[in-house]
Image (cartoon, rainbow, N blue to C red):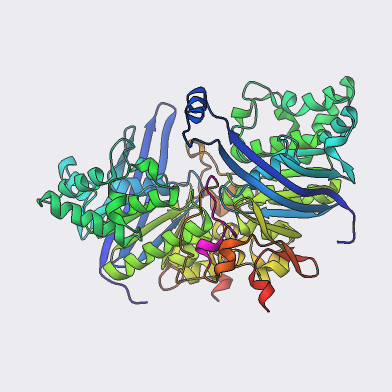
Amino acid sequence: MTAPALIALEGISKRFVKPLDLAAKIAQKLGSSVREEVVHAVDQVFLEVAEGEVVGLVGESGCGKSTLGRIVAGILEPSDGRMTYRGDDVTALEPTEAKAVALKIQMIFQDPFASLNPRMRVRDIVGEAPLVHGIVERGEIEDYLDDVLRRCGLDPNFKRRYPHQFSGGQRQRIGIARALAVKPEFIVCDEAVAALDVSIQAQVLNLFMRLREDLNLTYLFISHDLGVVEHISDRIYIMYLGRVVETAPTEELFDAPNHPYTQALLREVPRLDVRHSIFKPVSGEIPSPLDPPSGCHFHPRCPHATERCRREIPALKEIASGRFSACHLNDET
Amino acid sequence: MTRGPVTLRVDGLRTHFLTKVGVVKAVDDVSFQVGRGEVLGLVGESGSGKSVTGFSVLGLVDPPGRIVGGRILFWGHDLVALPEAEWRDLRGSKIAMIFQDPMMTLNPVLRIDTQMIEAVLAHDKVGRETARQRARDALGQVGISSPDERLRAYPHQFSGGMRQRVAIAIALLNRPDLIIADEPTTALDVTIQAQILYEVQKLCRETGTALIWITHDLSVVAGLADRICVMYAGRIVEEGGIDAVLDTPLHPYTKGLIGSVPSRNRRGVPLSQIPGMTPSLLNLPEGCAFRERCPRADEACHAMPEMTVPSVDRQVRCFHPHDEAIG
């Protein structure tokens, strides 16, 4: 990475704690072994995104990728760790500056049906934030909206309509327009194309690419779909049960995955050019984040697991320039 | 290509929904066949009629939907005119279905063994113990370890992937000749999806069960299926062997669909998208339904193209297919 990081996460963790209710508290006082349930959704994650870069964040359900995305977007507070934006610690900023930073980071959600208020017209959904934040004057809002909508491939004449009058792909475009309306620099896309049909998904992916060039945007692109991430990202982070297990530039990652989990994941992505395949799956389930395995989280499913993997958490180490992997196997050679 | 005896032949099937605002031709003149041990991929986007096709074969179309034409030949017997009682005998025994959401198959308040034994006893006059044994075997077959313990569990005690395995096990209970799987892995994670695909593939090989795999995901079908039907707006637009269709698509829609899938070699290059969106089935354009999104459309496309056979084992419904591809 030559460019300075736009966003950097340093040792970010997020724990969700289910507090004990009254009965459980009493039971605990009386010597019962009831404990608070703690989910380590995100565990000590370091992540950097340079300006103009598209970073993919990949993982299966429950791996904490969405939680991480929400922390970056400022929707959730991290339990531990530091997040910097252009070098400034976001949590230590003055309120006005923090607000300015929050505006620069916007999020696009997975479900285009749930993320738009059904009782607001498109012009209010998209236009409310820029007005409130004083990005445009009230007199210029109409022209501004037309411009934003057109940029997202929507007909400005649809401004007075409600979300239910649009198809899934169009709604996702409204979501994108809403994010863009406040002139962000950084966009977190959380499974932003997962709910769309293939042909519509291609349209929206192309829109993302075009907007990136036109507006010099930076993306954190969260997805479980490796094909999509591979297509759009410059660099990829792979997560498993709250931890980053590997990160590398896209091509290198796909050419030579290092971590056994990444290898398994890549092997199992269905591809158009792989026909009549004989499926040889990794065994086992994704463990519950309530009760993750000791040591390396992947060891119960890993074909190369050793005694050390059961005991010791592997650190994310640089294995080549720009490539990091968290696996004990890398120490042996 | 050698093909086994034909398990199911669907011939000119039409399933229409007679709604207040008009007739929705969800399935219109659909024909295909699937043989013993064969895997047929039925691919299309939402609203293309792929699921309704599956439901029609099982006789599960509810009013206002109705099969208004065509034949569904299962081992040569037409199912369309079958009385409900006989259709009931077939369903779950000779023809089984796996749904996208396994909770559609499973009753949340009954234990797995209750549900599985019930499914066996509904079709076979065997004792409870034999039925339990069969349930246990079926769970083993789909790769569930310690089936005895699992039989006593409730559906909520299983993870999504495990539930789908149980649903598949239930489909297998009566050793069906045909399984219709409607997006069974769409809701699952990649590693879990691979496990399910592995089990399904093994079963078709070992038992000769014919499989219709309904999905929107071309990549899954690429690895699994022997043949593929591509549906658009209620009709099959292209049909053929999996390699032939994916390597040299003839229909502009198939070509567009393949171009829309992000793939290795074109990283960062814009995807070749299909313009516009899927038309409403209530308001289809006259002639070819794909006409308005098609780069090759002209005057001729205002009429409905018929299925043509451009080469052996291939069918396409288009006036201007990409036939330069096959020379």
Q: Position of residue B101 (x, y in %)?
A: 41, 44
Give the x, y percent position of residue B188. 49, 51
Q: Main secondary structure of the magenta part?
A: loop
- Above or below B320: residue A78: above
In the rendered structure, the answer to whether residue A42 lies left or right of residue B2 reads right
Q: Residue at x 16, y 45 (%)?
A: B122
Which portion, as a residue range, is magenta? A290-302
Residue B119, position as x, y percentages in the image: 21, 47
Left or right: A191, with A53 as reference point: left
Task: Look at the image and tell me whether residue B147 can be seen.
Answer: yes
**Could you tell me if residue B276 is visible in this image?**
no
> Is residue B197 or residue B176 the one in the foreground?
B197
Quick one: quadrant of the C terminus of chain A?
A: bottom right
**Where residue A29 sits in the image (x, y, percent)?**
51, 28
Whether residue B107 appears in magenta in the rendering, the answer is no
Residue A299 included in the magenta stretch of the image: yes
The residue located at (41%, 42%) in the rendering is: B26
